[in-house]
């Protein structure tokens, strides 16, 4: 393994200290291009959210089949402990998108129940 030394500010060094052991993986992930389906998924979700969806549309919203297939691939690789650092980051992004949509659906359902 090659060792690389860089100079950073004291402030940045303090921020990096807790993740020092993970820096090679973080850098590798940042240098690799994200999977195109992730970008498509963000555009798809944003387009949906900006379309002024009805409460029922929100509750019925699902990722595209391509996104569902990609998530399944990543989950399978994760189960087999074969995820590359960039794929792990990508899976985390899908989980973040899912968390946001789950919160939106939960709040929508609460609002519907409160008004009925």
Image: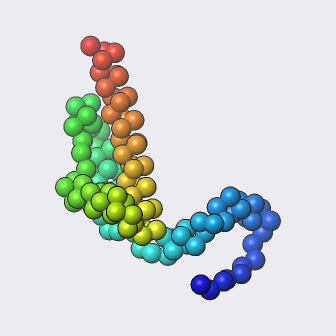
From the viewer's perspective, is residue 94 above or below residue 102?
Answer: below
Please name the residue shown 45% across and 62% down the image: 89
Q: Residue furthest right?
A: 10
Quadrant position of the C terminus in the picture: top left
Relative image position of residue 35 (x, y in whole percent): 35, 68
In the drawing, does residue 64 fall left or right of residue 28? left
Residue 54 visible in rendering: no
In the drawing, does residue 11 fall left or right of residue 56? right
Residue situated in front as seen by the camera: 91 or 67: 91
Residue situated in front as seen by the camera: 111 or 25: 25
Please name the residue shown 24% across and 41% down the image: 61
The image shows a total of numbered marks equal to 0
Residue situated in front as seen by the camera: 45 or 101: 101
Q: Residue furthest front?
A: 80
Please name the residue shown 39% across and 58% down the image: 91
Relative image position of residue 2 (x, y in whole percent): 62, 86
- Which of the 4 quarters of the picture holds residue 1? bottom right
- Which of the 4 quarters of the picture holds residue 110? top left
Residue situated in front as seen by the camera: 50 or 43: 43
Please name the residue shown 34% across and 22% down the image: 111
From the viewer's perspective, is residue 71 above or below residue 99?
Answer: below
């Amino acid at each position: 393994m090659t060792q690389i030394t860089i100079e950073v500010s004291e402030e940045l060094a303090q921020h990096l200290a807790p993740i020092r052991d993970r820096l090679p993986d973080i850098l590798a992930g940042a240098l690799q291009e994200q999977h195109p389906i992730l970008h498509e998924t963000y555009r798809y979700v944003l387009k949906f959210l900006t379309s002024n969806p009805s409460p029922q549309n929100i509750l019925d919203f699902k990722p595209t089949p391509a996104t569902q297939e990609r998530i399944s691939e990543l989950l399978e690789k994760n189960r087999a402990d074969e995820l590359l650092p960039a794929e792990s980051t990508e899976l985390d992004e899908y989980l973040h998108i899912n968390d946001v949509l789950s919160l939106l659906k939960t709040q929508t359902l609460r609002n519907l129940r409160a008004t009925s």
